[in-house]
Image (cartoon, helix red, strand yellow):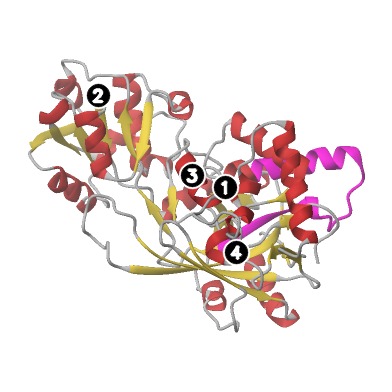
Amino acid sequence: MPEIQAFYGLRYNPSLVTGSEVISPPYDIVKSDDLHMLRHSDSATNSDRKYNASILENPSPTPAGYEGVLTNIKKWTEAEILIKESVPSLYLYEQIFKLPERGVDTDKNSKYRRRVLIAATRLSKPEDGVIRHHESTMAGPREDRLKLYTATKHAISPILASVEDTNSEFLNLLNKDYGSEIFVATDLSGVEHKLWKISEETQIANFRKVVNDLPATIADGHHRTMTALSYLDNAAANRKLPSYAAERFALMGLASDQDQSLLILPTHRILLEDSAPEDILDRLSGLYQVTESHSLEAAWETVRQNANGPVTFAALGLTAQGKNYSIHLLTARDSNQIRSAMPSQLGAAARDVDILVLTSTILRPIFDIDGAALAAGTKVGFEENIHTVEDAIKNKGAKVAFLANPATIDQVQAVAATGEVLPQKTTYYYPKLGTGLVFYPLTGRVN
């Protein structure tokens, strides 16, 4: 079970900067246009955007770029733009948000509130089963993040993990009143962020006791987790680390799996190079009932309604692309037949994840797209908005696309419990935890 500790966080000084000017999306989703907006304003000289967290999170991938992050941290600390806690603390972090526009009206006006606990969380290897992983990682991002860790000696953005909170004890603690916020911001996408500091020893002890009894699974931030483990290995190889050395812990936001605002959005698949073979409908008909649809919204609504079975996909462009692209619904004829068609090495839990069904029964056997091709990102695009998928088929030269339901929290945790991992882009937890709430020094000790 995960061990959490309070830590000496480094955070923005709310009396000197405006939260909305310094908060940033994490490095893996921020776009170049967003970076320009985050770092510049009409009055750049007077704007707090010159202290935006993206400057620390997204440096130029060069030795000078990485080292410049530490230079900025030191300069901003000397100017008291950043302040370090005088006592070890945990942090309650709240996000208030609406679902992003996904091309459907369902739930678009509903407002959600998600709370997580930000804590220094003791690192352990995936095979130890203490904090379980559900997604594989790529070497490039791991190397980039390790260079940043090594040069700056700080973790800039938190990892998100879900804990199996069957009795909602953790959720109840998260939802208590902790006084006045120390940080408030609204980001470019309209998500509101609030942060509370928890330094009272009894409150810290309550969180530690509850979380220590709950299994945990990495939800978002597998590359950051593996980076932290590599950093720990390097540090331990060079000197003897005390048990509570900061290097032995990671900056992690822990969420309750009973929180209805812990959401996973779909990541639809867009085939960027491959056209469907002429006999595609015949090849699909063995496992799927294939029916034509004349409405993208109606097809997607059918897919959503079948989230609990039978497995259903909407396929765009199987027989026609461009302005008059085709839409087909693919509905599994028999769930046992689907499971039998999937790779024998997959466990029972993984066989119930729709995206894995899509990969195993359609993308791999018909289009020769396997996990490696998905990871490379050159043959397949990923998108959560159905109309962006449609635009790729109608106007941008994509050949085929598939709309699929996302994995559920229970499915992710069940797969992780077996030690299996899913391909990249299987899950998209929304919203991502922001960067800029609190930074984690990788020197000294926690608590």
Q: Which residues are magenta?
A: 225-254
Q: Quadrant of residue 363?
A: top left
Can residue 88 be seen? yes
List the residue tagged with mark 1. 221
Q: CA distance from mark 2 to mark 3?
A: 25 Å
Work out whether mark 1 precedes mark 4 in sequence or the reverse, and give the earlier one.
4
The residue under label 4 is 214
| Circle 2 Cα neighbour tier, 10 Å, few/some/many (<14 / 14–19 / ≥20) | many
Question: Residue shown at 63%/44% (left/top)?
Answer: 224
Q: Nearer the viewer, residue 310 or 335?
A: 310
Kindly identify the amino acid type of the residue bearing the numbered disc 2.
Lys
In 3D space, how far apart are the residues under numbered discs 1 and 3 (Cα atoms)? 12 Å
Q: Are marks 2 and 3 in contact (CB under 8 Å)?
A: no
Q: Nearer the viewer, mark 1 or mark 4?
A: 1
How far separated are the C-alphas under marks 4 and 3?
29 Å
Q: Amino acid at mark 4?
A: Leu
Q: CA distance from mark 1 to mark 4?
A: 19 Å
Q: Amino acid at mark 1?
A: Gly
Query: Which label number is shown at residue 399?
Result: 2
N-term mark: 4 or 3:
3
> Which image quarter is the N terminus in?
bottom right
Residue that carries the numbered disc 3 in the rendered image:
29
| Residue 244 sits inside the magenta stretch | yes
* Figure disc tally: 4
